[in-house]
Image (tube, grey):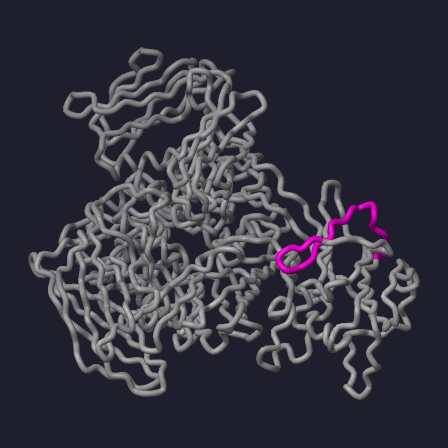
Amino acid sequence: MNRRQLLLAGGASLALPLILAGSARAMQSGEALLATGFADDIDPAIRSRERLDQDWRFALGHATDANKDFGHGLRAFFFAKAGYGDGPASREFSDAAWRLVNLPHDWAVELPFDGRGNTNHGSKAIGRNFPENSVGWYRKAFTVSPADKGRRISLEFDGVYRDSVVWVNGHYMGTEPSGYSGFRYDITDYINFDGENLIAVRVDATGEEGWFYEGAGIYRHVWLTKTAPLHVAQWGTFVKSTVNGAQAYLDIEVAVDNLADADQTFQLRHEVYGPDGRKVAEVETQSLNVAGHKTGLFTAKLAVTTAALWSLETPNLYRLRTLLVKDGAVVDVYNTRFGIRTIVFDPDKGFFLNGKNLKLQGANNHQDHAGVGVALPDGLQTWRLNQLKSFGVNAYRTSHHPPTPELLAAADQLGMLVVDEHRMMGTSPEIKGQLERLIRRDRNHPSVIIWSVGNEEWALEGNPLGTHLAIEMQAFVKRLDPTRRTTVATSYSGKGVSLGADVIGFNYGAQHDVDAFHRAHPDKPAMMSEEGSTLTTRGIYFDDRARSHLNAYDRQGRPGSSLSIEEGWRRVQERPWMSGMFIWTGFDYRGETTPFGWPAISSQFGMIDTTGVLKDTAYYLKSVWTLEPMVHILPHWNWAGREGETMDVRVYSNTEAVELFLNGRSLGRKVIVKDSHLKWEVAYAPGKLSARAYTGGKQVARAEVVTTNVPAQTRLSPDKITLRADGEDVSVVWVNVLDKAGHIVPTASDRVYFETTGPIRILGVGNGDPNSHEADCVADRHTYQNVGSWRSLAVDVIEGRPEWVGHGVDTSGWRDPMQWMPPEAQPPLTKGVVLQGRFDRSVIAAGDKIALFIDQLSPDQKIYVNGDLVSAQSVDGALKIELAAARFKDVNTLAYLLRTPEGGIPGIADRSVGGSKWGTLRVTQSAAPWQRSVFNGWAQVIVQSTGAPGRAVLKATALTLKSSAAAFNIV
């Protein structure tokens, strides 16, 4: 059965926005990543780009019931008239009862696992079977200074999963169906410069785009950009470089938007700064002109006399600083990070970087990570790339969608090549628009070596339409970026898409006759875009299918459809025309639980698990992809009760020979065949199994596995202990269970509890077990119920009479305050008014917290719940009443007694958002304590600074183990 069946069953170069240049190194996970058009050193009065990640309000709505979706879509003229955003899209709506969250945010990772969920998406309780969990609302208030009048103000989203609708100040901005493409709205005309502004975003994750975990929510950054009306367009620069000896020639394209009414005349000045920060070139063009409300495209040329090339070893980055000058004043500045390098895909010799033949040692990856889902903090992007580099990966395929900008920024800085992939093949306006956004956004990144316009499009792989669409899409890409080639990854070749591919991407050698294709199409470069699909569980050496665990030995995962890692790499090495191989996959990922269904919740294709712990197959790749001497032994050596049984012992090494010892006794020395492994059959005896690796007759590396004692202690190992006090920086912390001697116990499964003190918070936990249903991310779970059936009564005295405010009062003869009446039919105003609404008993579990959020209708109002006078506390502009479960009846009442306000009942009803502001009941199930069982001795915690400086501590405890702690300095 192939992967498709399994799924159906269940040149020259450039670069863009980046960070600081430098030599190849392991970046710290907290270093800032500067993406496209960064404005860190620009006067904000000229151009500003502010992250809007902090302090969003969030709540789950409902996909099929408008009443449970906070009444959205029920207001008259809601979508018929401008500014009639209703429910949470209304400016007047109160979100005081909602959770406060920071972006990036993925609400799906917070949901429980459920057998009714889609196993391809990780069996989370989201999707069509869970309408109550599939819509999320976000709201954020922000201010804009009156000094910004006359500027253009744009709201930019890097990625929202999915089907998002955005309103600003109650006005509809637009809809973006894609869960991966960035999008932007010019909100200038809707800005309130004299008070608060309100962004509302409705996200519907009911539908799916992929066959893997995709998350839900605003899971990438949001930006507020301010410019003059005359400015460099979004993603408006393109730097193309040509290398000639030590020199590089730069061709610069700049798109300039003129959003003013009149034509504009200006100058453009380009300054190029080298990796060391010094200016290395500049040029100025005079008397340029753009008509009003038009975009102009302008070019310039300059030379860098001694170019520092971008490479894997020395990822040198340059900065283009573009200044737009009008009437002697700088009106815009735009920064572009780029690199100078050459890339060639040769049909006979493979891939070349800067004239050097280089095999692509690649890994396919989705974008989720244990603990945080798809809402990765920037530092985790860097950490993940470093984990891949640790076993020799030099290329990354963004399977199967546009990546987050910060991933490419990290790849530029670290020296990692990237295959940048579009989501879907096609030429419709929507699909081409998404493709254009991808190319324009990413075409300055030196790490990007090729564009992928599709993956395994089964309906196109065997017919002429596939050939045609591949040719059309690649021509479209070439018009936007003539410096790179394109590819399509195919599971079938010889017809359709493969014939139209510029560079053919073979998915799995066993599914193709690659040699026959190469003979038939000798001018077409090729790469193995996917290989492996091996199925292994970290630390498991005998199949345990009841637990969805599969042994970690390298073998064909799907005979007839894919190859083992070793065989796949050997075939690539034997073919100089094959540019390289991309393993499926680098990291394990949620979903696509082949060959299992429920209760498995994650894939097992990865070379490393969902937390980033290397599996044994990663060590094979390290032995053939890296040069520093290494040796690795599998399996572990804890096999109590199996004494005397023969164990399949394998050794990976990049040396010439390895000698294996058991408890000091040599089991023989063996010579390593290139790109292979060594194997011994060893009768198990407790103790120590060690391997000594030799090159040139000298020992150059050593490894051992030992029989451990019982678990005795925990250990925390942060990747760094100094964090920036910015509320964003993270540290990735390994959690291990050790015996008394300090050895990791490879079979340990102890549950560990975590707590923090000081200015850090836990973002998530994980352990890499593909069958674990423990929570990765704990959060308070809120359910909401609006108080409804409102009735009003005009009264002449302000008294809490039982017949007015008591429980069980017959209000059938009272007025419906929401019913419109013409002014001439309105009754005369009285001294006071009683408002009474009703709500049913909610489902309340032991330990739940109950609160009623109400409005401030008058300063001296009195509030009654079930006839009892209650007091409220002020919370974020609303009033909150804490309630006890014992006070609830089957039907409950909330009553206001107040002096009649100006405008009477119609006035307060108009501001009530359908009565929702008058009463919202919130039931809160408090988050469980942070905890995780280690899986085969390992788990992971991701911690983040809260924004304040100071000393912080993460503590780990377990019932029978010695505790441990990790201290952090937040500066």
The residue positioned 55% from the left and 72% from the top of the image is 169
Along the horizontal axis of the image, is 61 left or right of 173? right
Task: State which quarter of the image contains the C terminus.
Answer: top left
Can you tell which quarter of the image residue 706 is in? top left
Along the horizontal axis of the image, is 861 left or right of 238? right
Residue 559 visible (yes or no): no
Relative image position of residue 518 (x, y in whole percent): 24, 57
Can you tell which quarter of the image residue 149 is in? bottom left
The residue positioned 85% from the left and 52% from the top of the image is 889
Along the horizontal axis of the image, is 10 left or right of 65? left
644, above or below 421, in the image? above
Q: Which residues are magenta?
A: 873-892
860, above or below 628, in the image? below
- Name the residue nearer the viewer: 947 or 677: 947
Along the horizontal axis of the image, is 173 left or right of 293? right
Please say whether residue 479 is one of the residues in the magenta stretch: no
Please say whether residue 878 is one of the residues in the magenta stretch: yes
- Name the residue nearer the viewer: 685 or 9: 685
The residue positioned 24% from the left and 57% from the top of the image is 446
Relative image position of residue 275 (x, y in whole percent): 19, 53
The residue positioned 47% from the left and 57% from the top of the image is 53
